Image (tube, helix red, strand yellow):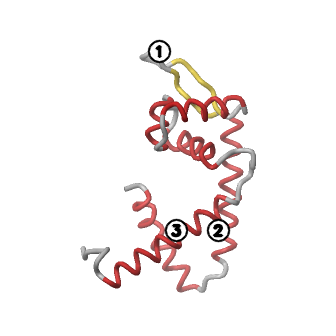
């Protein structure tokens, strides 16, 4: 593997990838179903969808926020009917946060809207570009989870 920062071509590719991912990410964030939820609240719901129920502390670590901030976020989501707090199975001092059916439906609708937007955008690619993007998707997925 070359030195991606100091090799000129690799550094340019890294910079281009960073810029493109950031721009697409920002544009995708605007394709929301529920404008009343913050990006952080949507992210917490997405984490619960991917990882299942979690304690507020676990969510704080996964979302890279402080525990008191996560406590506030969970309270807001609970007030909106998007999460519920249940007793922890092993530790009565803790609570487990899980998403509600309302959250699942909202996440599915949001995912469908973003997928449709991205598919419409991809219509502007030619066949060769689309094949390259399809081939790159698993690599980008891996990179996102490293």
Q: Position of residue 50 (x, y in %)?
A: 52, 44
Look at the numbered disc 2 and give the secondary structure of its residue: helix
Look at the numbered disc 3 and give the secondary structure of its residue: helix
Answer with mark 3 or mark 2, whichever residue precedes in sequence: 3
Q: Quadrant of the C terminus?
A: bottom left
| Residue bearing the label numbered 3 | 21
* CA distance for labels 1 and 2: 43 Å
41 or 54, which is in the foreground?
41
| Residue bearing the label numbered 1 | 93
In the depicted structure, whether residue 136 falls above or below residue 126:
above
In the depicted structure, whether residue 70 falls above or below residue 36:
above
Q: What residue is shown at x 72% (from left), y 33% (from top)?
A: 80
Look at the numbered disc 1 and give the secondary structure of its residue: loop
Looking at the image, residue 132 sits to the left or right of residue 85; the answer is: left
Report the disc number at residue 118: 2
In the depicted structure, whether residue 85 falls above or below residue 48:
above
Foreground: disc 1 or disc 2: 1
Looking at the image, residue 79 sits to the left or right of residue 14; the answer is: right
* CA distance for labels 3 and 1: 41 Å
Q: Quadrant of residue 145?
A: bottom left
């Amino acid at each position: 593997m070359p030195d991606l920062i100091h090799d000129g071509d690799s550094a340019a590719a890294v910079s281009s990838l960073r810029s493109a991912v950031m721009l697409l990410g920002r544009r995708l964030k605007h394709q929301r179903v529920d404008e009343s939820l913050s990006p952080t609240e949507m992210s917490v719901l997405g984490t619960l969808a991917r990882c299942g129920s979690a304690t507020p502390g676990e969510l704080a670590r996964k979302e890279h926020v402080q525990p008191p901030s996560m406590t506030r976020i969970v309270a807001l989501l609970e007030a909106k009917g998007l999460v519920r707090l249940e007793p922890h199975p092993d530790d009565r001092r803790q609570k487990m946060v899980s998403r509600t059916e309302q959250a699942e439906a909202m996440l599915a609708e949001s995912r469908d809207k973003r997928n449709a937007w991205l598919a419409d955008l991809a219509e502007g690619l030619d066949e060769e570009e689309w094949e390259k993007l399809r081939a790159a998707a698993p690599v980008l997925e891996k990179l996102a989870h490293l």
